[in-house]
Image (cartoon, coloured by chain):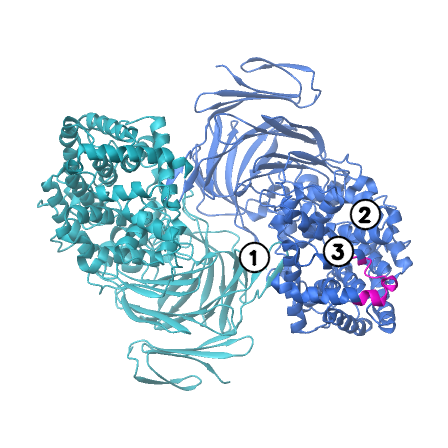
Chain colours: A blue, B cyan
Amino acid sequence: MKRLSPILIVFIFLACNEKVNKDSIKEHPNLILTIKAVNSMRASLGEISLFDQSVEEIRAQVDAEIEFGIEVPIPKDLAGGYTHERHKTNFFTMQKAGVLFQITAEEKYAIYIRDMLLKYAEMWPTIGKHPAEKSYARGKLFWQCLNDANWLVYTSQGYDCIYDWLDGQTREKLNKELFRPYAEYISVENPQFFNRIHNHSTWGNAAVGMIGLVIGDKELVNWSLYGLDIEVPGDIVKDNDGGTIQIDGQKEAGFLAQIDHSFSPDGYYTEGPYYQRYAIYPFLVFAQGLANKMPELDILNYRNGLLLKAVGALINQTNSKGEFFPINDAQKGMSLASRELVYAVSMAYYYGGNDTGLLSIIKGQNRVPLNDSGLAAAKAIEEGKAKKYVYKSIELSDGASGNEGGIGILRSDDLTLVMKYAKHGMGHGHFDRLGFLLYDETGEVIQDYGSARWVNIEHKDGGGYLKENHSWAKETIAHNTLVINKDSHFNGNVKEADKTSGTPYYFTVDSQVQIVSAQEINAYKNIEMQRTMAMVGIKELEKPLVIDLFSVQAPEGSRYDLPLYYIGEFMSSNQKFKANNNLIPMGKESGYQHLWAEAQVDVNGGIYNMTWFNKKKFYSVTSTIESGDTMILARIGANDPNFNLRRDPSVIHRRTAGNTLFANLYEIHGGYDYSSERPLNLFSSIANLKVIYQSSEFVVIQFQLKSGEEYQFSFSLKDNNETNMHSVESSTGKVEWQGTYDFKTINN
Amino acid sequence: MKRLSPILIVFIFLACNEKVNKDSIKEHPNLILTIKAVNSMRASLGEISLFDQSVEEIRAQVDAEIEFGIEVPIPKDLAGGYTHERHKTNFFTMQKAGVLFQITAEEKYAIYIRDMLLKYAEMWPTIGKHPAEKSYARGKLFWQCLNDANWLVYTSQGYDCIYDWLDGQTREKLNKELFRPYAEYISVENPQFFNRIHNHSTWGNAAVGMIGLVIGDKELVNWSLYGLDIEVPGDIVKDNDGGTIQIDGQKEAGFLAQIDHSFSPDGYYTEGPYYQRYAIYPFLVFAQGLANKMPELDILNYRNGLLLKAVGALINQTNSKGEFFPINDAQKGMSLASRELVYAVSMAYYYGGNDTGLLSIIKGQNRVPLNDSGLAAAKAIEEGKAKKYVYKSIELSDGASGNEGGIGILRSDDLTLVMKYAKHGMGHGHFDRLGFLLYDETGEVIQDYGSARWVNIEHKDGGGYLKENHSWAKETIAHNTLVINKDSHFNGNVKEADKTSGTPYYFTVDSQVQIVSAQEINAYKNIEMQRTMAMVGIKELEKPLVIDLFSVQAPEGSRYDLPLYYIGEFMSSNQKFKANNNLIPMGKESGYQHLWAEAQVDVNGGIYNMTWFNKKKFYSVTSTIESGDTMILARIGANDPNFNLRRDPSVIHRRTAGNTLFANLYEIHGGYDYSSERPLNLFSSIANLKVIYQSSEFVVIQFQLKSGEEYQFSFSLKDNNETNMHSVESSTGKVEWQGTYDFKTINN
C-alpha cells in the first residue's frame, strides 16, 4: 500500500480536476473500459491486493518498454524473429499503457501510445505486403493477416484509452492514415482471411469491429458483425494448415456467424481447446465492446449466453494442472494461466453469475485483467469468497447445433479420461476418431502427441508448424485409436473428415461407474468402430480402474494397429519381447515412417500385461490377446532429419481379423520414493481378463484380481434404452442384465 | 499439543514411578539413546513442533505395523520381494518402536519388539543360508549378509530400548539363541564379508559392534573395532559388483580401519556420495554408540573429527535440489531427504559445533531423528536460528591420505559443475576419469547416466544391478569424458583402475573466474590427458559461461570420442546433420553397443554450435572443430532387450589426431513460457571460438560474443606457480601472462 500512495495522490488530484473539466464531454474510454469502471478501479487502488499486484506487474512491464524506447521496425521477420516480436510487444504494450493511463492518469502512458501510433501511421503507407510469402493471407506488419488482426485488437483498446486525450488533428490523422486503411487491409483487401468461419477470421472481425467502435466508423462495425458482401476469389482454396477457405454451403460471415458456427451449444469449439483458448479472446473482448457500445445487440446473451458457456467448456477441458487437453493441433503446456484465460475467467465470473468456484481458478492465475471484471473478481477473492472449482464428468457436444459428435470427459479426483468423437476440427484437426487421453495427479498417463510445433521458437522453422505436423502428428497412428490397414482415418483427407463426426452413444456418471461410449462409421469405408470406456471404482484397488472396449466390425483380413502412447519407462511384461538390433522405420507413410519398432512379440496365453513407471508411480495395462496377435514396442523419431519429434514410446497391439474386440484395463498403482528407495504396490493387480461374449450388439468381459475377486462388465452396443433386458449365451453361461450396462462382482 | 497430552500424563506417572524403582538400577538405553537424553526428550514433548511432528510420524508408522501384526516369514525373496521387504520393515519398525517406548513409556511398543524378537529367535536355528545363491556372501534373512547386517544395526537399537524392561530369562534367550549366533554369522562365518575395507563391511562391523555393546559382549566389540584375526578364504575374490575382496597390502580390518581407509581427510568416500550416504549411517550410529559407551575411544574426534567432516562432504556433493551427484554407481534422486542424512545432519549439527546453516537443511528434511541430536536441532529451529546453508566451490581430495585425486566442485548460485579425477571407487567405480556434470536451478544440464539399476524395483531383475550397469553405465563412453581408440579407460579393468587416481592440477575460486584442472596419465597407456574447466562471469551474459579445455597428448592417428550427455530436446545446429534412416549400434563393446547413431555430420567451418531446450530454458554448446572432425547425435538404447536403459541423447565429437585440444563453451540462456508462448534469448551468444595456441604446456583460446566483445583465456598446463611469467607466440601474435591462468577482454 505504501507503494501505491503516489497513485492515490494523482487520483485525488484527478478526481478534482475531472469535475472542472466536466465529465459529460468525455466519451472514451467506452470500448472495454468505461468511465464508470475507471472510476471504480481508481477508487479501489490500494484496497485489493490481487488487483494492486496486477496493476504493478503491468506498470513494471510498460515502464520497462518506455525506458527501452519506441521501435517500429520495417517488417521483415517470421514469428520468433526480431521485427515480428517487436511489433507484438508493441501492441501488447499499447493496450497495457492505455489501461495504466486511465487508472493512474499519468500522461507518459498516453504520450507513449500516441508517439508509437504516429510512427505506425508514418510507416503504414510506405510498406507493402510482408516480404515472407508463405501465408494464404499475407499481412503487412506480420507475415500473416492473423497477426495484423492481433495488433489491431490490442491497439484499438490502447487507442480508446487516449482518444479523448488526443488533440483532434492527431485523431483525424490516425483514423484516416492508419486505422481505416489498416482495417480495410485485413477485411476488403483480404476477404479470404476475413470472410471465413475460422479463428483467424474471428480475430479479423473483432479487430475491424473494435476499431470501428472506437473511431465511430459504422461501416467497419457492420463488416465485422455481418461479414463482407464480397465473393472470395476462387484461387485461394486452402489456408496454410490445409483448412479450406470456404465451408460448403457457407452463406454467412462476420462475428455473429462465427458465434453461430464456431461453438456447439455446450460451448465446445471444433478446433479444440488450444485454439479455443486463442480464439476466445477476440470473441470476449469484442463482445465486451459490443456490450458497452451496442447494448441493443445483447451479445452476452446471444445463443443463450454461449460466449460465457464457452469459457466454462474451456475450463473443463483441462487436466488437474489446468493445462488444456492437447487434442488437434495444440502445444502442450498451454493452460488457464494464459493471458486469454486471465481475461476470460474473470469475465465469466463477473457476467456469468459470480460462480465462486471460478475465484479459485483466478487465484491460481495470480493476476486479473484491469477492468471491471478483474476488479470484481479480485475484490471477491479479497473477501475470502473463493471456493474450490469442482471438475465434473461431462460430455461436450460438437457442431453448431450440437449434433455432430463431441468429447466425453470422465473424472474421479485427479484421474481424468478424455475420449474424442467430435468433428474433425478443420485445418487443425487430427485423424483421431475415438482416441483417448488419460491423466492423473502427476500429469499425462496416456498421452496425445499434440502438434509437431515449437510455437514461436525460431530454431524450429521459425516457430510455425513443422512438416512433421502433417506427416506425423495428425496421422491416426500418432493417436491412441485404431488404425486399420495402415491408413489414417479418411485416408488423411481433411475435406472428407470435415464432412462427418463421431456419434455419441452413451454417457453416464454413476457413483461407482462412469461410462463414455461412441461410434465411428465414416473413418473407414464399410467399417464400424465403437469404443466404450468406463472408469469404475473397485474397492480392492487404490484408484479407479479404466476399462477400454474397442469393438470393430470389418471384413476378415483387416489389419488392426491399436497404439497406446504411455508416458514413462517400460518396467516389465508377461510376454517376452524380442528387441531389434537394427531399427528400421515401421512404414513409408501415414505416420508409420516416423516410428521405430524397437521390439516385438508374437503373444501367447490369455493376456498381455505390461507395467511402466513414471514420476514415482506405476501403471499397468492388461489386454486380451488372440492367437496371431503381435505387440510392438515402438518409438517416435524415424525420418526426422531436424530432430523435431520427441522420442516417446508406445506399445502397438497388432491383430489381423474381421469383426473383433480389443479389451484393455488400465491401472494406476503404487509408488516409489527415491530417498527411501521403497516401492509400493509395484505390480498389476489383474490376474486375468477374458472376453466371454462379443458381437456387434453386446460385449461381456470378466476380470479377476490377484486377490481373487472377480468382476464382470456387460455392455449393450446398439440399444441404450435403460429399461430393456438383455441376455446372451457367453462362454461361461447365460449373462442377463437390464439397461445399457451392468457391472458387478461375480461368484466363482 | 492437544494430541500429546496423553503422553504427558503417562510421563508424569512414569516419572513418579521411576523414583520408586530407583533410577540407579537402570542401565539401558545406553547405545544411541541415553537415559539422560530420554529424560530431555520426554520433558520437551509438546514444546518443539518439528520434534513433536517427527514423533507423531513415527508413531503413526509403528502403530500401523502393530495393527498389521507381527510377521516373520521364512526367507525366500530377493530385494523388492515379499519376505525381503517384510524383514526390512520389521527392523525399521523395531528401531522406531524402541524409541517410542522410551519416549512415551507405552508398553505396547516394548511388547511388540519382544514378541517379534522371540519369533526371530525361534526361526533363526531352523533356517540355513538364504535360498538365493547369487551373493558372494549369502545372508540368512536376506539374500546377502549386507542386509542381515542392516537388520542387526537397527534391531540392536530397538533391543537396547527394551533391554531393562525384559525379564532376565528372555534377555538370556535372545542373547544366546538369536543375537550372538546372528553376530557370528555375519562375522566369523563370513569373513569375506566382514573383514573387507568396504561399505558392506562397515555395516557388518557396526552391526556386530552395536549388539556387542548392547549385550555387553566384549569379544563382539573387539571384532567390530579391529576386525577378525581370520584369513579370508581365497576362493572368493570378487563381490557381486566386481569389487575385489582383499585390497592389496591390506593388513587391517574392522571399524577403525574402515574410517582410516574409507575417507579422505576431506571426508570424501571413494565409492562416491550415493554409497557414502548409505555407509554414513552405520559409521555414525555405531560411532554414537561408542561415544556413549566407550568414551575413552573419543571416536568423534578420530582422525580430526573425520566422521562429521564426512557429513559435510556429503552435503557439498548435492545439486541445488539436495540430490547427490550420481557419480559411480548411483541411483539418481537420492538426496538429503534420505533417512541416513536425517540422522547425519542433526548429528553433525549437535556434535559439530552447532552450524546454523545445517538447520536450514534439517528444516528442508522436515523431520529429525528421535535422539538428543534431533532434539537439539529441532529446538534451535523452533528458536529461529536456521540460516541458509551456503554452498561453496570446493575441491574434495580422495584417498586415505588425501593424495589420490579428488573431485572439484565449482558453484555460482544454482549453477554447479562437478569434475571427477578421483580414485576409481572400487567395485562401484565408473571408468570416467576427467568426466564432468553440470546443473542449474532446473536440475541436470549435462548428465551422468548414474547406475543402470532400479533400486528395489522388482520388475528390473529384482531391483539389483542390471547387466547393463557393466555393459553400459560403467563404460567411458557413457560419461562426459574422452574415449580413445574405442576402449574404456583402463580397458575396463577395475583392478587396474583401482591402482591409480587422477591428479589434481589447479583449483581456484576468484570472484569472476573459478577453475578446476586435473590430469590423467594412467587411463590410457602412454597418453596424457588434462581437462581444465572454468566458470567465468561475463557481464554481457545472463549466467556464467563454462569453458572446457580437454587437452590430450597421444600418438598420431588416435581416434577420440568426446560425448556430451545434454538433457533436453535438440533445437538446432549450425552444421547440417544427416539423419540415419536405419539405426545400427555404434559398436560391439565398451558401451558403444548400446548407442544408436541417429545422425552425423562431417563438420566444416570454424565452430560447431548447437542449442537444446529443457524445462523452459535454452542451452548451447560451441566447440572448435578441425578438418575431418565428425559430430554424431547418438541415443542410448541399442542392445537393450529388457528396456533397462533410458533413451537419452548425446552429441559425440569424433576426431582422429595426435596431440590435440577439445575446446568447448557451454551457455545457459533465455527461457520460454508455455502460457504466453514467448521465447527469450533463445540463441547462443557466441559468435566465434578459436584456439590461438596449444601445446602440451599452454593453451590460449579466444571467443567473441555476437554483441562484439572478445575474450581471451590463457592457461598454463604444466606450471601452476602463480608468479611465473608465460609467453607464447599465438596465431594472432604474442600472448603473455603471469601465473597459471589469465582471463580478460581483448581489443580487436
State if disc 2 and disc 1 touch (CB < 8 Å).
no
Q: Amino acid at mark 1?
A: Pro
Q: Which residues are magenta?
A: A17-35
Tag 1: Cα neighbours inside 10 Å, few (<14), some, or many (≥20)? some
The secondary structure type at the circle numbered 1 is: loop
In the image: residue B44, left or right of residue A84: left
- Whether residue A251 is situated above or below residue A575 in the rendered picture: below
Residue A221 in which image quadrant: bottom right
State the residue position of label 2. A258
Label placed on residue A40: 3
* Label of residue A641 in the image: 1
Q: Is residue A28 magenta?
A: yes
Q: Quadrant of residue A50?
A: bottom right
Counting other residues with Cα less than 10 Å from the Cα at mark 2, is it few (<14), some (14-19), or many (20 or more)? many
**Three-letter amino acid code at the position of disc 3:** Ser
Q: How far apart are the alpha carbons under marks 3 and 1? A: 57 Å
Residue B386 among those drawn in magenta: no
Mark in front: 1 vs 2:
2
Residue B730 at x, y percent in the picture: 40, 84
Q: Quadrant of residue B476?
A: bottom left
Nearer the observer, A78 or B642: A78
Q: Chain of mark 1?
A: A
Give left or right: position of A194 versus B689: right
Residue located at (9% from left, 44% from top): B230
Residue furthest bottom as drawn: B734
